[in-house]
Structure formats: structure tokens, C-alpha cells
Image (cartoon, grey):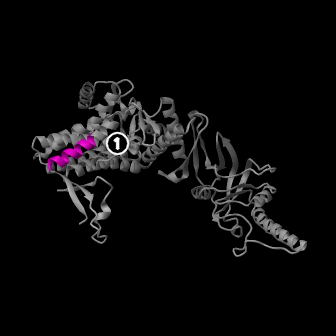
């Protein structure tokens, strides 16, 4: 074996180390939950500065070394990948479960009892979420905007939040069919010019032409083409050249003239192929010969070159066309069509805006902002909004936000714990207490005393007001459904499940070995050497 043990943490020490790492990470992002969470300034190793109060962005940029903390980051990544929202909630709940478990250990409860109790509590909580859900129709735009606004609350001002929510709902509704949303038909295009209020939704596809040279000296290319017919060429457009001949020698003027005529005929043949196919826009994945571009321009054919491969496929889907590798493949079946094609110059960005044809669905969001950081944050927030609206449309169910759902689950778990015969009921109650960290954190970030807020919220829920949560603008209890603060059911399900799985995984670890690579000169001694992760060793976790 090519590793040697340098340090070993066992039993309570291993669990205590994991719990400390997980809770410390959650503390780093804790105040980002809620509209009055403080913005964070992250300074990377290279000096890059990012200002954000989004938990997912913070975790994505933090330098994490402890393996237990990395596992908590994986919780956030899994939450973001699956549902696009609820990352901060999942991380805070994970940390609280770890913290509660440590207190149970100190009371003598065995880790097996704690993890088993957590698993039972998680299953009960997820099952009870269905009864708390509110049905939403795919065309209920008011409720869809509520879900989108809730997802973006605290990440920008109220006007911006309303703009993001409106754009997301309009985009999703435009590509929704029978309760299903094809996200590949939504394109987000950040543009560093103007303000957020200038952001617009285009019924079609906006293609970034930053690397494309669409101007030819002395030639006035069209800027707007109605009833456009597009040829999508997935190869370089030029005349064919022999691979074996790099230079051509001529010994008479007639030979040179013959070569020129051959070249002109070759260009004319390619232009004729596009003209015969009634093409007035040529989009090429690679470069287009300057002479050919001039020849096409003389026929009022707009050319766009060096278009990214993914943009080519989006164009094919948006125009109902096909990519061809030769002009000989052009036919009514392969060419695409659009109501219009327009060249737009916004700030430092050149766009080709292809308005939809009636047989396809595709929309583009032009997100405007004064700086690159603003448009990047706008894009991230809009992506979250779109994911949330999509989940709401496809699942058709939402839950009250503002901590109302967590309070309801906590109350029901405590009632359930009364029927648990063994000591696992302590773990179930601890899970209920952990759920209440969400309304408590919301109260803290809203400038309200968390204890007072929790007591009042519990009293309201005891009286049957299960939709009551914390209005973070006023710091007062209020019906979240009436206030329009709702979250997709799927987001909460994943947050609870991810937090329970991560916490139990760390709590089951009772042996951590830090091992460093030892070079014994034998390259065939096994595969263990490949697991070394750099100097200082790599902690290995072993579950009991």
C-alpha cells in the first residue's frame, strides 16, 4: 500500500470535526436567507471581487478544504442542479441538523438512533408537504409571478424583482405546451448596455455575432429582411482547392485568364445554389470567403459567419431548418424560414434577431445592464426564476413561503414524535426544531427578535393559521398565500431530503483517516496512489 497514516480521528472526534465544519460553512452564508440579508463581498485569490447575497453564488466561490464542508457544498449544488432554488435553505437545515445531533450525542443518544430518527422525520415531513400544497393552473399567471417573485426576493430591489418575475413568466408561458416546458427553447442573452428596465422578451432567437464579421468594405448589407429564408451551413464556405497543390504556376496570360474564369464560375455556381433555393440569409458555422460574401451581398443575401455550434442548432430548431455541409444539399426541406431577420447593435454587442416562424417556439430574453457584473447577476437570477416557474407549471403545486411551511411541518412532527415509542422520538423532535431555523433566520435578517417572532408564529399555527409566515418587510406574521409568497412544492421536497441525507451521511462517519502519499518506487503496487489529492494528505471517511 502506497499510503501511510499520519492522523486519525475516531468516534466522537470524527463526528465533532464534521459537525463543526458543516455548521461553520452555514454560518458563512446564514444571513443571505431573506430580503434583508446583507450583501457579501467575495474576494478571490486572483483579486476578483464579487458582490452578492445569494447563497449558491457564495458557496460556488468559496475556497473549501474540509471534506465535510465539501459535502455540504454538494448539497447546495445538488439542490441547484435539480430545482434551481432553495440552496440556502438546504444548507442551513443541514447545519442545524448536525448541531442538534451533537446535543443529542452529549445526552447519550447513539448515532444510530439519531440518524434513524432523522430518516423517519424526513419521510413524514415530505409526505405531509402534499397536504399543505396549493394547486396552481399552468395559465395562472398571477400565482406564477408570485412564485418567481419569491425566488428573487432579497436579491435585487422590488422593481427589479417584478421585472425578473414578469420576464420569466412570459418566457415560460411562451414555450409551455400541455403543462410541459422545453427550457431549450429559451435563450438568455446578456447585453452590457442600458438598464434592467430595457430588458425585453423576443419571440424568436437572438444570436450573438461578436466573433462574426458582417460588414464588407464598400458593400451595404441589409439590416432587416422580411419573410426570411435561411441556409444553415455547417462548414467553411469557399471554392474547393486541391490539397496537393499549394502554388499554381502559369506560363501564359491565357492560362491566368482561364484560372480566373474557373474561379468566377465556381463562385457563381455557389451563389446560384443559394439564389435557386430562395435563400436571403446565410448563417455559417465557420468562415465565409470574402469574395463569396461580396457575391452574395450583390444578390441582397445577408451572411453571418463564425456562428457557434450551439447557436446553429438553436437556429435550426427556431427556423425549422437543417444544417448542411454543402451547398449541394440545399432544398426546401433543409432551408429554414422566419418572419424576419434583423441585425441589431446594442452597446458593444452585435445581435442577429431571428423572429419565429409559425411552426416553431423559441423566445429570447435580452437582459440589459450597465456593467458585466450586473448582467451576469441578472442572468443568474433570471435562470432561477425560470426554473421556479417551470417547476410550478409542471408540478402544479406551491407551498406558503416565509417559514410557514417549516412551522407547519415542525408542529406535525412533534405530534408524530408523541407516538414514537423509543428514544428516536428525541431525534424526530430535533428535526422539528431544525426546521424552525428558517423562520428564525428570516426574523433575524428582518431585524426582528427571533424568539419573539417564533413564539407568535407558533401561536398562530396552533390556532389553525397554517399559511401564516413572517412578512420580512414589516416583521409581522401574515398569510403568505394572501401576500403572494409561495414556493414550488418540489423545491421544499428536495431541500428537506437533501439536508437529511447529507446530515446523516456525516453523522454515520466514525473514523476519519488523514493519509499522505509515500513514494515507494513501485508504480505497480496498486491503485491507491491515484487517490492522493495533493500535499498535506486527504482525509478519508469511513462509515460504521
Residue at the spot x=14%, y=41% of the render?
A: 104
Residue 17 on the magenta span: yes
Q: Is residue 325 above or below residue 409?
A: below
Residue 217 on the magenta span: no
Residue at the spot x=66%, y=49% of the render?
A: 352
Is 240 positioned to the left or the right of 1 in the image?
Answer: right
Q: Is residue 19 visible?
A: yes
Residue at disc 1, secondary structure: loop
From the top left corner, tell me how far across and down residue 101 is, in percent. 18, 43
Quadrant of res 291: bottom right
| Residue named by callout 1 | 133
From the top left corner, tell me how far across and down residue 445 is, in percent. 34, 29
For the stretch drawn in magenta, what is the main secondary structure? helix
* Placement of the N terminus among the 4 image quadrants: bottom left
* Placement of the C terminus among the 4 image quadrants: bottom left
Neighbour class for label 1 at 10 Å: few (<14), some, many (≥20)? some
Is 80 positioned to the left or the right of 200 in the image?
Answer: left
Q: Is residue 1 above or below residue 44?
A: below
From the top left corner, tell me how far across and down residue 128 is, in percent. 27, 44
Q: Residue furthest front?
A: 521
Question: Over which residues does the magenta segment extend?
Answer: 11-23
Q: Is residue 117 visible?
A: no
Between 509 and 434, the residue placed more toward the observer is 509
Is 282 positioned to the left or the right of 77 in the image?
Answer: right
Is 7 positioned to the left or the right of 440 in the image?
Answer: left
Q: Is residue 508 above or below residue 347?
A: below
Between 114 and 26, the residue placed more toward the observer is 26
From the top left corner, tell me how far across and down residue 206 is, in percent. 62, 48
Amino acid at each position: 500500500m502506497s499510503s501511510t497514516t499520519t492522523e486519525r480521528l475516531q468516534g466522537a472526534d470524527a463526528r465533532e470535526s464534521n459537525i463543526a465544519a458543516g455548521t461553520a460553512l452555514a454560518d458563512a452564508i446564514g444571513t443571505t436567507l431573506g430580503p434583508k440579508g446583507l450583501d457579501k463581498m467575495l474576494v478571490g485569490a486572483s483579486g476578483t471581487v464579487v458582490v452578492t447575497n445569494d447563497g449558491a453564488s457564495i458557496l460556488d466561490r468559496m475556497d473549501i478544504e474540509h471534506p465535510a464542508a465539501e459535502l455540504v457544498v454538494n448539497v447546495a449544488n445538488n439542490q441547484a442542479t435539480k430545482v434551481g432554488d432553495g440552496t440556502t435553505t438546504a444548507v442551513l437545515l443541514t447545519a442545524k441538523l448536525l448541531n442538534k445531533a451533537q446535543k443529542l450525542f452529549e445526552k447519550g443518544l447513539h448515532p444510530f438512533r439519531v440518524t434513524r430518527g432523522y430518516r423517519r422525520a424526513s419521510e413524514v415531513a415530505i409526505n405531509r408537504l402534499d397536504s399543505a400544497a396549493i394547486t396552481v393552473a399552468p395559465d395562472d399567471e398571477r400565482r406564477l409571478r408570485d412564485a418567481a417573485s419569491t425566488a428573487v426576493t432579497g436579491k435585487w430591489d422590488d422593481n427589479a424583482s417584478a421585472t425578473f418575475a414578469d420576464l420569466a413568466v412570459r418566457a415560460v408561458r411562451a414555450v409551455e405546451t400541455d403543462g410541459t416546458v422545453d427550457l431549450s427553447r429559451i435563450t438568455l442573452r446578456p447585453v452590457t448596455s442600458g438598464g434592467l428596465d430595457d430588458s425585453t422578451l423576443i419571440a424568436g432567437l437572438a444570436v450573438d455575432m461578436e466573433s462574426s464579421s458582417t460588414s464588407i468594405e464598400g458593400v451595404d448589407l441589409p439590416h432587416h429582411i422580411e419573410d426570411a429564408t435561411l441556409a444553415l451551413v455547417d462548414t467553411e464556405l469557399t471554392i474547393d482547392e486541391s490539397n496537393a497543390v499549394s502554388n499554381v504556376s502559369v506560363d501564359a496570360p491565357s492560362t491566368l485568364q482561364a484560372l480566373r474564369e474557373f474561379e468566377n464560375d465556381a463562385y457563381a455556381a455557389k451563389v446560384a445554389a443559394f439564389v435557386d433555393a430562395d435563400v436571403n440569409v446565410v448563417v455559417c458555422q465557420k468562415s465565409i470567403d470574402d469574395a463569396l460574401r461580396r457575391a452574395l451581398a450583390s444578390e441582397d443575401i445577408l451572411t453571418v459567419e463564425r456562428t457557434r455550434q450551439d447557436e446553429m442548432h438553436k437556429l435550426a430548431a427556431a427556423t425549422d431548418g437543417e444544417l448542411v455541409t454543402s451547398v449541394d444539399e440545399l432544398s426546401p426541406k433543409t432551408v429554414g424560414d422566419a418572419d424576419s431577420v434583423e441585425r441589431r447593435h446594442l452597446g458593444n454587442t452585435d445581435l442577429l434577431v431571428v423572429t419565429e416562424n409559425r411552426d416553431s417556439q423559441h423566445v429570447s430574453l435580452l437582459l440589459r445592464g450597465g456593467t458585466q457584473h450586473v448582467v451576469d447577476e441578472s442572468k443568474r437570477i433570471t435562470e432561477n426564476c425560470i426554473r421556479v416557474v417551470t417547476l410550478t407549471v409542471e408540478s402544479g403545486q406551491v407551498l406558503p413561503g416565509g417559514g410557514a411551511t417549516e412551522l407547519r411541518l415542525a408542529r406535525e412532527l412533534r405530534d408524530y414524535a408523541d407516538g414514537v415509542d423509543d428514544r428516536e422520538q428525541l431525534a424526530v423532535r430535533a428535526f422539528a426544531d431544525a426546521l424552525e431555523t428558517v423562520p428564525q433566520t428570516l426574523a433575524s435578517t428582518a431585524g426582528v427578535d427571533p424568539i419573539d417572532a417564533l413564539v407568535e408564529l407558533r401561536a398562530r399555527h396552533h390556532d389553525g393559521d397554517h399559511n401564516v409566515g413572517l412578512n420580512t418587510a414589516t416583521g409581522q406574521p401574515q398569510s403568505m398565500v394572501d401576500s403572494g409568497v409561495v414556493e414550488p412544492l418540489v423545491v421544499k421536497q428536495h431541500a428537506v431530503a437533501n439536508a437529511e441525507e447529507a446530515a446523516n451521511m456525516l453523522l454515520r462517519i466514525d473514523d476519519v483517516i488523514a493519509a499522505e502519499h509515500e513514494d515507494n518506487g513501485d508504480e505497480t503496487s496498486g491503485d491507491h496512489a491515484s487517490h492522493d489529492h495533493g500535499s498535506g494528505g486527504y482525509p478519508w471517511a469511513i462509515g460504521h
